[in-house]
Amino acid sequence: MQQPTGKRLQQTSMQARVAEELRQMIISGELPPRSSLSEMALSETFGVSRTPIREALKQLQIEGLVEVRPRVGTFVAVPSRRELTELFQMKELLEGAAARLLAFRGNVPEVERLEANMKAADAAVRDGDAEQYAALVHEFHDLIVVGADNSKLEAHYRTLMNQLAYARLVRTSLSRPGRLDESDDEHHRVLNLIQAKDGDGAERVMREHVRMSHQALMAGMDERRD
């Protein structure tokens, strides 16, 4: 017998809520990489049955945030070095395209917000405040993607950033000696080209910046293993 429409909608709503909360817990690091995700424990935590938990975990598995090991359990996924490289290659393509599109749009509100972001970032670098700078890095890249005014590009970018759990990774990248100043300089170069409406230059320099961030991340990860 088919469930009443109202009940099906209620379950779908619960699944979406659980998936979103789990997604944010993974991205923020509240649920660290390799954490075990027990359906029973999560059911108690969220105060729902195991059905929406199970469906939410399936959704997060599709997004690359959760790994299901048959007969072992479900865990917060940890991208391999190869997967990280592939994700950063996609990040480079998407953010390069976004910088190009934003440059062609001219003096839109996102450009003014980028200018304010850079002033705050410069202050964070002067103060040696890596935590504040990391938050501003996220905002800088997000503003460029939003400013591109391309909903398809933005949708792919959001999925990519969830898979990267970028909030955690950027701290590792910025822990490299001198990387704070380098990153800030690279952001200035990108913004200058956007302001100059140089789409080709903005795309090229943005892609270079993403490659440098990836290199710093990998070096930082290697140091933490030593």
Image (tube, rainbow, N blue to C red):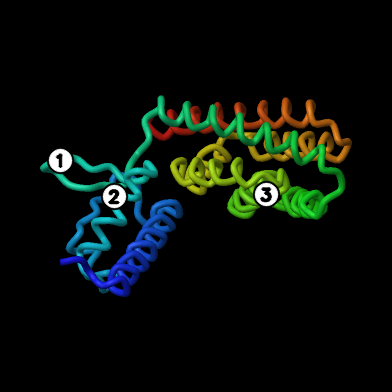
Task: Look at the image and tell me whether residue 128 can be seen.
Answer: no
Residue at numbered disc 2: 58
Q: Amino acid at mark 2?
A: Lys
Q: Give the mark nearer the N terminus: 2 vs 1.
A: 2
Residue 5 is situated, as x and y percent measured from the top left of the image, at: 31, 71
Residue 8 is situated, as x and y percent measured from the top left of the image, at: 29, 68
Q: Secondary structure at mark 1?
A: loop
Task: Look at the image and tell me whether residue 131 can be seen.
Answer: yes
Report the disc number at residue 79.
Answer: none
Q: State the residue in front, 13 or 75.
A: 13
Question: Label 1, label 3: how many angstroms apart (C-alpha)?
Answer: 39 Å
Report the disc number at residue 146.
Answer: 3
Figure quadrant of residue 25 = bottom left
Residue, x 27% and y 63% (percent of image)? 52
The quadrant in which the N terminus is found is bottom left
Where 61 sits versus 23, above or below?
Answer: above
Q: Amino acid at mark 1?
A: Pro
Figure quadrant of residue 81 = top left
Residue, x 33% and y 42% (percent of image)? 77
Residue at numbered disc 1: 70
